Every structure is written in structure tokens, then in C-alpha cells.
């Protein structure tokens, strides 16, 4: 795979790791005040944006916007599946995998000519 096609994928992977922590990491600390969770999440999201914006900017040279979005959704699901099991201790069940699989099929359709 050429670098111009790979860099957006790697940047999207990194951005999704940050965003998953921003969106769901606080669930492990439910006793902390909500405003602190919001502030920490915003701080983490800043790093997500520092990767996501360049991913889409670079990626738009080789992928269409719908393709970038489809790719991002699949990456998000993969990152979330690992995060849910590893960090939150909530492994996905068969129905979660089935639902995610349907989303992967939808993203695949976006890449068809």
C-alpha cells in the first residue's frame, strides 16, 4: 500500500484511540463529578482532532469523503471493541459483533465503483 493511502488510515486509527478514551474512558470513574469528566474528555478530544483533521485532509487526496467516513466508522468499531473488552471489562457479545459486521458491510459498499 502506498504511503498516501496508508497515512490517513494510521492517523484515523490514532484519532479513534483518543476519541474512544474521550467518549468512554470516564465510564470507569463514575463517581467523579460530571464536569470533571467533561473537561478531561475535551482535553483528550483535542489530541483526537490533531490527528483526525490531517487524516481527512491527506486522505481526501486519494479517498472520497464518503470513503473516509466509512473507513473511520470501521476503525472506530475495531478500536471500541478492543477498548470495551480491555479497558471497561465489557467484552462484546454475538449480537454486538453481528451489528458491527453489518456496519462493516455498509462501509465496504461505499468502496465499490
Image (cartoon, rainbow, N blue to C red):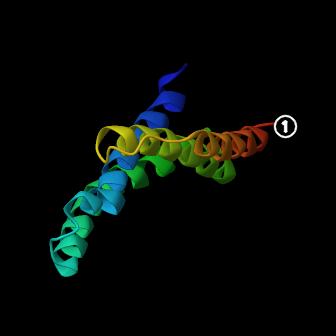
Q: Nearer the viewer, residue 82 or 51?
A: 82
Against 26, is 68 above or below?
A: above
Q: Position of residue 73 (x, y in %)?
A: 57, 49
Say which quarter of the image contains residue 7.
top left
Q: Secondary structure at mark 1?
A: loop
Q: From this viewpoint, which residue is outermost toward the bottom?
A: 35
User: Hey, which quadrant is residue 12 in on the image?
Assistant: top left
Q: What residue is drawn where x is 20% and y is 80%?
A: 35
User: Left or right: where does residue 15 sit relative to residue 30?
Assistant: right
Residue 66 vs residue 34: left or right? right
Residue 50: % across, % down: 31, 54
- The quarter of the picture where the C terminus appears is top right
Give neighbour class at mark 1: few <14, some 14-19, many 20+ (Cα, 10 Å): few
Nearer to the camera, 12 or 94: 94
Q: Residue at x 73, y 37 (%)?
A: 108
Above or below, 16 relative to 78? below
- At horizontal 48% and vertical 36% (from top left) the residue drawn is 9
Q: Give the residue at mark 1.
A: 113
Which quarter of the rendering shows the N terminus? top right
Amino acid at each position: 500500500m502506498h504511503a498516501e493511502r496508508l497515512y490517513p488510515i494510521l492517523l484515523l486509527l490514532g484519532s479513534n484511540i483518543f476519541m474512544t478514551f474521550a467518549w468512554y474512558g470516564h465510564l470507569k470513574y463514575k463517581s467523579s463529578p460530571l464536569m470533571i469528566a467533561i473537561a478531561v474528555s475535551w482535553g483528550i478530544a483535542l489530541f483526537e482532532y490533531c490527528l483526525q483533521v490531517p487524516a481527512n485532509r491527506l486522505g481526501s487526496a486519494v479517498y472520497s469523503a464518503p470513503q473516509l467516513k466509512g473507513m473511520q466508522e470501521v476503525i472506530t468499531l475495531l478500536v471500541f471493541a478492543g477498548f470495551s473488552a480491555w479497558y471497561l471489562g465489557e467484552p462484546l457479545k454475538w449480537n454486538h459483533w453481528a451489528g458491527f459486521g453489518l456496519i462493516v458491510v455498509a462501509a465496504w459498499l461505499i468502496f465499490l465503483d
